[in-house]
Amino acid sequence: MRKLVWGAMLGMLVALMPALGRAQTATDISELQKFLQDTKDQGDLPVGTKITMQNWQQYKAFMPFGMVKLFQGGYQWKMPSDVEIPIGPAHFGNLPKTFVEATEKYGAQDSVQVLPNGHYVLQNYHGGVPFPNPQEPNRGWKELANVFFAYAPAIVTSTPNNMGKIWFVDRFGNISADTFDLVYRQSGYNTDPGIPADETYMPGSWYTEWFMEESPEQARYTTSLAIFFKDQEEHPFPDQYVFVPALRRSLRLSTSARCAPIFGSDWANDDAKLNGFNGATSIYTADWMSDRKVIELLDPAMKAGYDYPNNYDLPVGFTKPSWGAWEVRPASIIDVHRIPSEASGYCYADRVMYLDKEVWSTFWNDNFDSNHKLWKVFAYENAQGDIPGLGRAWVGIAAMAWDLQNTHMTIWSSWGNPHQRTHYFNHQAPAEFLNGVKYGSPSGLMQIMR
């Protein structure tokens, strides 16, 4: 849908050097499995430590595997020589009280049924964390369900006065950028005060994602809409629509579009959700791999994420110490994949997700291609914000995506202009953005450009 602008000389270089930036030897899933085995005795990582290029091997047991690969430097994307990861104390109590109360009320009754066709069905879910203490059988799937239904504010919006931004970086350091508006709404299972448990604007759904480009001008008004349904056996894939300005109408995308890039970014449709997984729980499952302590940037000073490249450690676009201290937090690692009957032709054979065991959102993903070779590495830098009636809680992300095979990078700062407010949550949003039909249904797409 979009192309980077290439100079004639750079085009010639691309043709002459198609393998530039790829690792000399491909990394596969077995190397990650060996890494987890070799580093299972983690030792300690004291508060006050600063992880640098000089000492990182001492602390690699606390890192996601993809971060280790960036430190090792085997790909063109690698950690800069001045990288610094400060370690601070861990903070807990990051979930709003109403979500915690729903977990306590309903969590014990949630269960999973595996159908004869291999599909998974979550039963008796009404809100909160589905499986607060996931155990076998089907532990990996239960943890995936926790991610899929992890807390996010009932309504998250940006506006034309406070647009988020996506930067695209190629292997030569060329940068282009898009701005966007978004309206993400939870249409069912709500626990936030003042919001109905079930909305009526898109019957049968529990979540909708509306995402529109504002710039560049030639792409303006291009809009994506994803609708997630409660009954995932009837709707194993989210309904996906795109409004095409040139046609003045919307198109419904096929299920194969789950692997398609979003607006030319390094995120596929299955990657792009506030909690890092945008697939489903019916046709996906997961293998539990490990419980361990992993470093995570949970509540960064998000003002640092507004301005690429100035507030990023280049060339890889990693966080600077000004973003805030990282925490050593309890995590679970799972390997997510399609069930066998749905795996043919899917882009990822393994999606290794690092899950924060309090908020149950992923903070790092290592995605492997259909041949189990490391392809993309995603960092999700989680943030907190003020939720009406609830105080500070987990609200969303800035994120980085590194395509290690094709040496392309996407930086996503969903927090808009640093001189203006960040997102609007729930009824903080301007009245227009509370229109669920307009921003959460296929018919609403036809109101664009009017």
Image (tube, grey):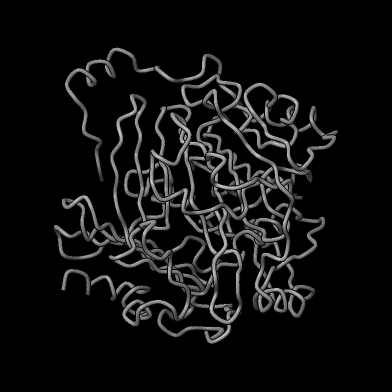
Number of numbered discs on residues: 0
Choose between 359 and 373: the one closer to the eye: 359
- Residue 372: horizontal and vertical position, in percent? 58, 31
* Foreground residue among 210 and 144: 210
Rendered image quadrant of residue 419: bottom left
Image quadrant where one finds the N terminus: top left
Determine whether, in the image, residue 318 is placed left or right of residue 414. right
* Nearest the eye: 347 or 35: 35
Residue 129 seen by the camera: yes
Please tell me whether residue 276 is drawn above or below residue 443 in the rendered image: above
Q: Quadrant of residue 418?
A: bottom left
Tell me which residue sits at (33%, 60%) in the image: 163
Q: Residue at x 82, y 57 (%)?
A: 135
Q: Give the residue displayed 22% in from the left and 74% down from the top.
A: 447
User: Which quarter of the image is occupied by the C terminus?
Assistant: bottom left
Q: Is residue 204 above or below residue 18?
A: below
- In the rendered structure, the answer to whether residue 163 lies left or right of residue 61 reads left
Image location of residue 272, percent across then percent down: 46, 53
75 horizontally vs 222: left or right: right
| Residue 2: percent from left, percent from top | 25, 43
Q: Is residue 239 left or right of residue 114?
A: left
The image position of residue 125, as x and y in percent, is: 67, 75
Query: Can residue 340 be spotted in the picture?
Result: no
- Dividing the picture into quadrants, the one containing residue 241 is bottom left
As displayed, is residue 173 above or below residue 434? above
